[in-house]
Amino acid sequence: MHGTAELRGDLLGRARAVAASAARAFDAVGGHGAAGAPAAALGLLADAGLLGYAVPESLGGASTLGLAPRQDVSVRALSWLRDELAYGDGLLDLMLVMQGLGSYPLARGGERELAREVLPGVVRGTSIAGYCLTEPGAGSSLDEVATRATRAGDGWRLDGHKTFISNAPIAHFFTVLARTAGEPGDRRADALTMFYVPRDTKGLSVEPFEVIAPHPIGEVRFDGVELEDRWRLGPEGSGLELALATLSRFRTTVAAAANGFARRALDESRAHLTRRRQFGRALADNQGLRFDLAEMDTRLRAAQLLVAEAAAAVDSGADAGHQVARAKLFATEVAGWICDRAVQHHGGLGVRRGHIVESLYREVRSLRIYEGASEIQKLILGKLVLAQSGPTPAG
């Protein structure tokens, strides 16, 4: 336990240092929204040795002192980092997690030789990963995936359209879920397969677009893309299992990032209410606003405890579906509420473009949607609660 506490302190300290230097790095490339900002963020994370925590230790990632098996990433380590990076800057958080989310199917399902070719660049920040699941007709239901990979000689031909792909405009490679059998919606467990697809492969094109909190995102199209069979990740037909294993590994860290945004919003509210005066007294003297702070603090702490429980359960190898769904649902919903209250506390300043709480309000909104929307988490939890036998366990 002593080693775990030391590792946590070390990671939080490095993440704070990266966040503290981010503004200067972004200014050097033209600002936070500039085209060079994601690469600048990756450079900071790589220099601090933090990208290694997105890759298993056995494949060149950083040591987590036994928090998780060497062949896997530690959810606790990633959660600590995402919480602290999100507190400092949402782009830092995004660039860290996308290196893990986009490369994990390769680490888990790819040939060792291919993984050892690609993953060192992920750790160095010189190879940027993208994760291609979502399609115009397939979001929460991956059974609806229509992008298709068909046998072509010794390899495969890939055709289809993915959307809402983070890192799409800047990625050097994608891990792509494609249909290799059946038809969209047929719910066959063996119908999908995952592939590693280099960005420079002929027939691959990207169209960027903008979302509420600006970051590199877009659509990816595959028009007769030729794939080598060694780029297949796992056995044919195992793609759904691999995609779900990836999401289950990283979903808790979404909740951790939500906690980081919420912490920052709470701190901004406390500082503003303390210094801002109206009607001859500080806003913090208003009982109703103190009640707000009490609720924000309590809900945030509950979310932190749920994330800690879920991360430890996943790292231990336990069946953690219940804990993960609770953490993802509660933390992301609470973060949205806390950031909303922070905007309200700041009044007009809270909706002024560029103000920190305005930025937090936009950053946190998507967390209730991606990697399993709140409604999906409720469906999971409802099913698990109904499946329980005997009384609900005591806390």
Image: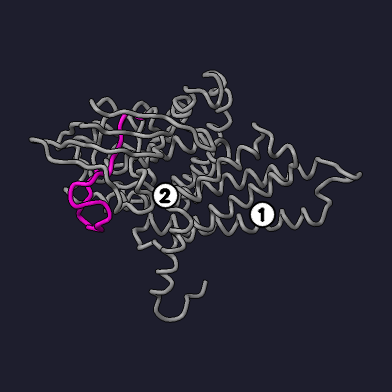
**First-in-chain label (1 vs 2):** 1
The residue where tag 1 is placed is 296
Q: Disc 2 residue type? A: Glu
Q: Does the magenta stretch include residue 298?
A: no
Q: Which residue lies furthest to the right in this view?
A: 280
The residue where tag 2 is placed is 371
Say which residue appears at 23% left-offset and 57% top-offset: 189
- x and y percent of residue 374 in the render? 48, 56
- x and y percent of residue 194 in the render? 24, 44
Of the residues tagged 1 and 2, which is closer to the observer? 2
Toward the viewer: 376 or 232?
Answer: 376
Q: Disc 1 residue type? A: Met
Relative to 385, say whether 122 is above or below: above
The magenta region covers 171-194
- x and y percent of residue 395 in the render? 52, 71
SS class of the residue under badge 2? Answer: loop
